[in-house]
Amino acid sequence: MKFVGLRGYSRYSDKKSLSLDEINSLEDVAVTLNRVRDGDEIVEVCRKIKHEHVILNELYAIASVSKSKKVTVSVGMNATNNLDLEFYRELGAHAVVIPPELNYEVESFQKKGLKIEVFGRAFVEMFYKGRCQLSAYASGKSVKKSGVCNMECAKKWDVVYSGKKICETDFKPELTVYDVEADYVKHETRQIKGEGVIENGADSKHSQS
Amino acid sequence: MELTANIPNLESMSECSIKPYDSIYLGMPYCWEYEGNLIAGGDDLSSAIELLHVMGKNAYVSTFAVPRNKDLKRVFRAIDLAAEMSDGIEANNLGVMRYVTKEYPDMKVIAGGLANVYTASTAELLYSIGVSRIVPAYELSIEDIEKIKETGVEVEVVVHGKVPVGIGHECFLKKFSSAVGKECPKICREDMFFRSEDLVLKPFGHATLSGKDICMYEHIDKLKFADAFRIEAVTERIGYRERIGRIYRNLIERGFSRSDFEELRSISENGFANGYYFNKAGQIYIPG
């Protein structure tokens, strides 16, 4: 299965996402709407999508759209335990994406009819995907709200202890490949231009390229 | 207006530090290993709740912010005790939140600022399943928060202190144990920041906080629609909670004071920011 981002609604840049018409001209794709928008708006857009499978990031939309489509709960919702899975099952979700950091404990998740999706290949970031506001804090560019990340994490940071610099560090996202089994194994490629390059940071001297 | 703060352990619970507040959130939600963490087990949590009740304060119990399956037993223990003795339970994890509203339907349940409540529609859904108060996602503007308030749910906003800019899988402080010569859990009592040009962050357990103090002292009127004002102080040194609380208590009861505002400035080691309330970068401060 291929995941495609709907322009204006997908996390990460709009450059590689597709318009509604483009998406509806494709066959057999799942559509990602994992940017924060009000639930009613997402529900309305989902009605216009011909495909039966969407990836969502907003609680009301998950509950509402699940009545008519297969809904995968985006990694941005940060499901980290079985109580999260129970809640999404109650809301009618089809599948839940587990953060890549938890791949090694994926067997501890009790599916009970819910599908589990994991990352077989992912950028492991400074924070859990969906739990980072660093770009918005630093520059006002919000990944959650506008899908744009300024990649502040990849900067060089001075580590200051008791007022004195003791060393430097950075928190560059690391492309990580996992040997992991689940109902769906996703390979993160959407924001990659070339091997090891995150699109949003590709022009930055701090990018991984 | 309810004034709240958070306290990680019994050691931090001096009478002076509690006095300015109506309600206290108990426990350190960012790290299990924090010394004396009230929600990590032991008898301290019940003692803390009793102490608050003797002082006539509301006792809310925080829960660990990013619980994995292996953490749930400890989470359940704290919830069971909180349901029996406290006045409310704060959850930043949606699964934990739903568990509490189902198992303890009469309990006051508070969605914390890390629960990622960004929209009125999410707030409405949570309200419908028994969540009675929401601390909106820190990243929201005043207009967005007002929309959440319109759903009928109680809203609590941070008016002062360091807010998380992210939460992750590991504690960054531990990476620098050898450089500092302090191991966990002593290292988080130390004064450590990450700096890059004008940006400052404070690593703390699984969370990384704004290095600057969010300060809405000069803009407090714009937040008067909220039900509660929170002072984020769970990672702060002794004395911070008391001084900031006293200043905001004065603000609520007597209004703006230039000398109090200057005292706030003197307490903040990295300066002020408004957070995201004015739709700007979170680290910017707009004077009132």
Image (cartoon, coloured by chain):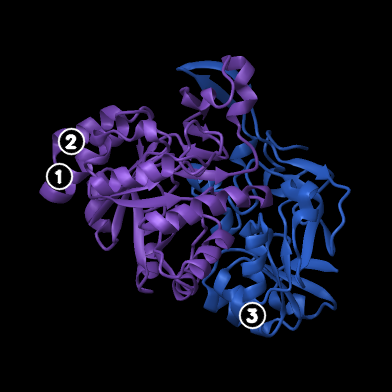
Near-viewer residue (B60 or A171)? B60
What is the spatial separation of the Cα atoms under label 2 and label 3, in whole angstroms? 51 Å
Query: Do tags 2 and 3 sit on the same chain?
Result: no
Q: As shown in the figure, which amino acid type bears the numbered disc 1? A: Phe
Q: Which shade of the palette goes to chain B?
A: purple
What residue sits 47% from the left and 22% below the top?
B190
Query: Do tags 3 and 1 sit on the same chain?
Result: no
Residue A135: % across, % down:
55, 46
Tell me, for residue A65, which label it has, or none.
Answer: 3
Alpha-carbon neighbours of circle 3 within 10 Å: few (<14), some, or many (≥20)? many
**Residue A165 drawn above or below residue B224:** above
The blue-tinted chain is A
Residue A65: % across, % down:
64, 80
Q: Quadrant of residue A78?
A: bottom right
Q: Secondary structure at mark 1?
A: loop
Q: Secondary structure at mark 3?
A: helix
Q: Which residue is mark 1?
A: B256
Decide: marks 2, 1 in contact (CB < 8 A)?
Answer: yes
What residue sits 24% from the left and 46% below the top?
B54
Q: Quadrant of residue A163?
A: top left
**Is residue B16 found left or right of A27 in the rendered image?**
left
Q: Mark 3, chain letter? A: A
Query: Do tags 2 and 1 sit on the same chain?
Result: yes
Alpha-carbon neighbours of circle 1 within 10 Å: few (<14), some, or many (≥20)? some
Q: Quadrant of residue B149?
A: bottom left
Residue B196 visible (yes or no): no
Decide: marks 3, 1 in contact (CB < 8 A)?
Answer: no
**Residue B161 drawn above or below residue B220:** above
Q: Looking at the rendering, in which quadrant would you find the N terminus of chain B?
A: bottom left
Residue A67: % across, % down:
66, 84
